[in-house]
Amino acid sequence: MKRMIALLLILCMALPFVGHAEKKTFKIATVVKESSDPWFIRMEEGVKRFAQDKGVNAFQKGPSKTDAAQQVQVIEELIAQGIDAICVVPIDPGACETALKKAMDKGIVVITHEATTIQNADYNIEAFDNVGYGAYMLDELAKVMNEEGEYVCMVSFLTNAAHNEWTDAAIARQREKYPNMVLIPEEKIETEDNMEVAYERTKEIMKAYPNIKGFLGTASNDPPGAGKAIEELGKLGQAFAVGTSVTSVAGPYLESGAVSAATCWDPAEAGYAMNALALMILEGRRDEIKDGLDLGAPGFENITVVDDKYINGQGWIVITKENMSEYDF
């Protein structure tokens, strides 16, 4: 009898815990192009905020320099660690495809950003429609050029899908709306997402084309690199740099006027939105990912979904000398 009573007591003590297994803490990795780049340091703030808000193990990693092979190695290492989801900002989307397919084959959720050509991903998310953004950058450049004169376009790498889409849209906008602007040379200038390379290429271009007025840059180091050359060669007020960058990189050149406008989106919010998508899939809520969804990040409160895979927000901003204090990243 005593033994039976003891067993009953043990059973009664266990009953409150039946059906209350410990909630799984998901492990979500965000892989960026380069770990020390100010753009991605800012993105990590969003990843950390997401981890705190949602109580998941979300973290960020990246190669020590902008190198596609090194980035793939980081992805492979994370796959081997048994993560639940991976969010990637590819240097070269094509170079990542095999590793991302491997991740998906293992049941790992894959979300990408700045990779509209990607195949092996659950979703690719952008802060905006790439064509609209490219046209917007060109409008900003046309404004400071008084809609006339020679200009060039810079991309980080010719393999960077997003940068090339922005550039193609910018050129199309110029040809459609600004006939007195002239693109030179016809090919895009590759800067390797490196400020010193952008600076050197700008000096070469200004030597070859002494009347050039505009530099449209798509990588965050392009406008400040061009701005540095504009300052050094005494071309302030005669040549202008516009394009994707942030205050922490372009600030001194915005202040001097060598960079007229830095167009961008907040990478912290993009990092948050990527992780939000990954968590929804992990929680079995994929059917909620549709037009109008709010991902909990400014610029991503009312997303649009194309072909059940490609997502756009409405998150671009423009930073100038007058408002740069509002964007301290």
Image (cartoon, grey):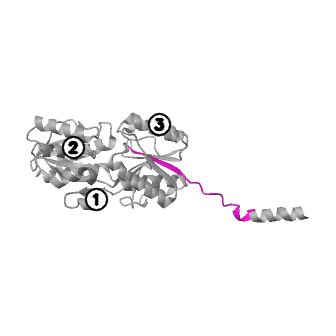
- Residue type at mark 3 is Ala
Q: CA distance from mark 2 to mark 1?
A: 20 Å
Residue 239 lies, in percent from the top left, at 12, 46
Which mark sits nearer the N-terminus, 2 or 3?
A: 3
Residue 245 lies, in percent from the top left, at 26, 50
Q: Quadrant of the C terminus?
A: bottom left
Position of 49 relative to 77 (above/below):
below
Foreground disc of the pair 2, 3: 2
Seen as rendered, the residue at the extreme right is 1
Which mark sits nearer the N-terminus, 3 or 1?
A: 3
Q: Is residue 133 magenta?
A: no
User: In front: 156, or 42?
Assistant: 42
- Magenta span of residues: 14-32
Could you say whether the residue bearing mark 3 is in a helix, strand or loop? Answer: helix
Checking the image for residue 225, the label placed there is: 2
Q: Is residue 217 left or right of residue 110?
A: left
- Residue type at mark 2 is Gly
User: In front: 291, or 7?
Assistant: 7
Number of other residues with Cα within 10 Å of mark 1, as a class: few under 14, some 14 to 19, many 20 or more: some
Could you say whether the residue bearing mark 1 is in a helix, strand or loop? Answer: loop
Number of other residues with Cα within 10 Å of mark 2, as a class: few under 14, some 14 to 19, many 20 or more: many
Asked which quadrant contains residue 61, the reply is: top left
Checking the image for residue 99, the label placed there is: 3
